[in-house]
Image: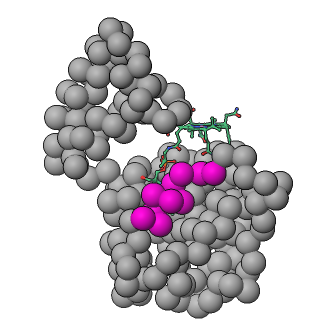
Amino acid sequence: MNVHLINPSSVSFGTAVITPRWQYVLAGATPKIFGDPILVDETLFQVDPNRIQPGDAVGIGIHTANALRGYEIGKMARERGAYVIFGGIHATLYPEEARELGGAHAVVKGDGDVVWAKALTDCQAGVPQHVGVGTDCPRMPQALLVLLRLADRWAASPPALLRCSGGGDRATAASRFSFRRACG
Ligand code: B12
C-alpha cells in the first residue's frame, strides 16, 4: 500500500511559492511500515493518476479555494481503487461535502498528525473510518491556559511569540505552540 499526500491546485506554476506544511507534518507522522509517502504539490506539477494503485491510501488536504480540484482528485483516486482520506480546514468545516463530492472514505477533522497513523491502519485493514477527530488532547484545558498566558506575554514582549511562530497569524501560531507544549 503506497501512501500519497496531495495538495490540489488547478494551476501548476512549476515553481514552489509557499509549500503547504501539512504535507510534511503528515509525512513525518506516517509510520515507517508504510514507507515514504509520495508527495504531490500540484502548484508544482499535476498528479499522475497512473501512480495511484488499488489499495493505496490517498490523503488530500483542502482549503476552500482548492476544494473543487481536491474533489476531482478524490473521485479519480477512488475510481482507481484507492482509499481516499480528506483533511484540512475546508474538510474540517464540511466533512460531508468531501464524502458527497470528493469520494472520501474518511475525513479527518482538525489536526491530522495524531490520527494519521490510525487512518492508515484502518485503510490497510479495509475499514476506513468516515470521520476522525484529529485533535485528541486530554489536557486541552491546560493548553488553553498556556495560550492565554502567551496572549498576555504577547502584549508585553512581541518577539517572544514571533520566535515561536515561523509565520502565519499570531493567534494560530500561539495556539499551535501552546497546544504542542501542553500535549507533548
Ligand atoms: C500559513 C498560512 C498561510 C500562508 C502559507 C500557505 C501555504 N500554502 O502553506 C500564506 C500567507 C501564503 C497563506 C495564504 C493564503 N491563505 Co492562509 N493560512 C495560513 C495559516 C495561518 C496556517 C496554515 C498552516 O500552514 N498551518 C500549519 C499546518 C501544519 O497545519 P494545517 O494546514 O492546519 O494542517 C493540519 C490540519 O489541517 C490537518 N490537515 C491538513 N491537510 C490534511 C490532509 C489530510 C489527508 C489529513 C488527514 C489532515 C490534514 O492536519 C495538519 C497537521 O496537523 C492558516 C490559519 C489556520 N488557522 O490554520 C491560514 C488559512 C489556512 N489561510 C486562509 C486563506 C483564506 C488564505 C488565502 C486564500 C488568502 C488570500 N486571500 O490569498 C491564501 C491561499 C494560499 C494558497 N493557495 O494556499 C484561510 C483558509 C480559509 C478556508 N476556509 O479555506 C485560513 C484558515 C485563515 C483564516 N482563518 O481565514 N496562508
Displayed quadrant of residue 179:
top left
Q: Which residues are magenta?
A: 19-28
Q: Which is more toward the observer, 29 or 127?
A: 29
Query: Is 22 covered by the magenta stretch?
Result: yes
Query: Is 89 covered by the magenta stretch?
Result: no
Q: Position of residue 48 (x, y in %)?
A: 75, 78
Displayed quadrant of residue 175:
top left
Q: Is residue 142 left or right of residue 106?
A: left
Q: Which is more toward the observer, 135 or 22?
A: 22
Q: Position of residue 59 (x, y in %)?
A: 54, 68
Q: Is residue 174 visible?
A: yes
Q: Is residue 16 above or below residue 33?
A: above
Decide whether the magenta segment is chiefly helix, strand or loop.
helix
Q: Position of residue 44 (x, y in %)?
A: 76, 60
At a point 73% along the width and 52% down the height, the residue shown is 16
Q: Is residue 18 left or right of residue 168?
A: right
Q: Is residue 55 above or below residue 176?
A: below
At a point 21% along the width and 46% down the height, the residue shown is 183
At a point 22% along the width and 49% down the height, the residue shown is 184
Looking at the rendering, the quadrant in which ligand 1 lies is top right
Q: Is residue 44 left or right of residue 77?
A: right
Q: Is residue 6 left or right of residue 160?
A: right
Q: Position of residue 5 (x, y in %)?
A: 57, 68
